[in-house]
Amino acid sequence: MMRTAMRDLGLAPDLVLVSPSRRTMKTLEALEPWDDAPLVDQVDSLYLGGPAQLLAVLHEVAETVRSVLLIGHNPGLHELALALAGSAPPATEARLRGKFPTAALAEFMVSGLWGDVGQRTTNLVRLVTPAELRGG
């Protein structure tokens, strides 16, 4: 479902940063095959990492990378998404504050360099949840 939604939205990462856990690797497998295969990097610090660790991983992304998919764990991913929401549309931000379910997708627009990613350089574009994709 999410694979189709990402394709329909034109979301094709250049780089996938994934926690080495079995659950996150299954999530990655569910997104394959890719139309244009991204570079995939297992990052140990994503395993149950808090928002500071996740942000540090993003800060290390090469500046030549245009788009990144981060596959990790809650509550860290949810807390990071909240911290980076920026000037999101109010309804989208309210949904994000409410819940960030397993397999949710938060799309952010980043202005500037990966090393500068933070609240002032990101905006939440959309939040897609599995329940929405199932029509519920």
Image (tube, rainbow, N blue to C red):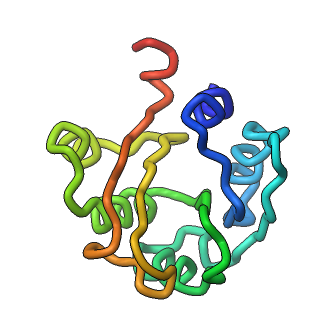
Residue in the foreground of this view, choosing between 100 and 127: 127
Seen at 76% across and 70% down, the residue is 42
Left or right relative to 128: residue 28: right
Seen at 45% across and 50% down, the residue is 107
- The picture quadrant where one finds residue 1 is top right
Location of residue 56 with respect to 21 vertically, above or below: below
- Most extreme residue toward the top is 135
Location of residue 119 with respect to 25 vertically, above or below: below
Location of residue 3 with respect to 102 vertically, above or below: above
Left or right relative to 40: residue 86: left
Q: Point out residue 59 in the picture as x, y percentages from the top left corner.
A: 52, 84
The quadrant of the picture occupied by the C terminus is top left
Q: Point out residue 64 in the picture as x, y percentages from the top left corner.
A: 67, 78
Residue in the foreground of this view, choosing between 8 and 119: 8
Seen at 37% across and 42% down, the residue is 126
Residue in the foreground of this view, choosing between 3 and 130: 3
Q: Point out residue 96 in the picture as x, y percentages from the top left corner.
A: 28, 46
Q: Point out residue 101 in the picture as x, y percentages from the top left corner.
A: 43, 40
Residue in the foreground of this view, choosing between 27 and 70: 70
**Count of number-bearing discs:** 0
Seen at 25% across and 41% down, the residue is 92
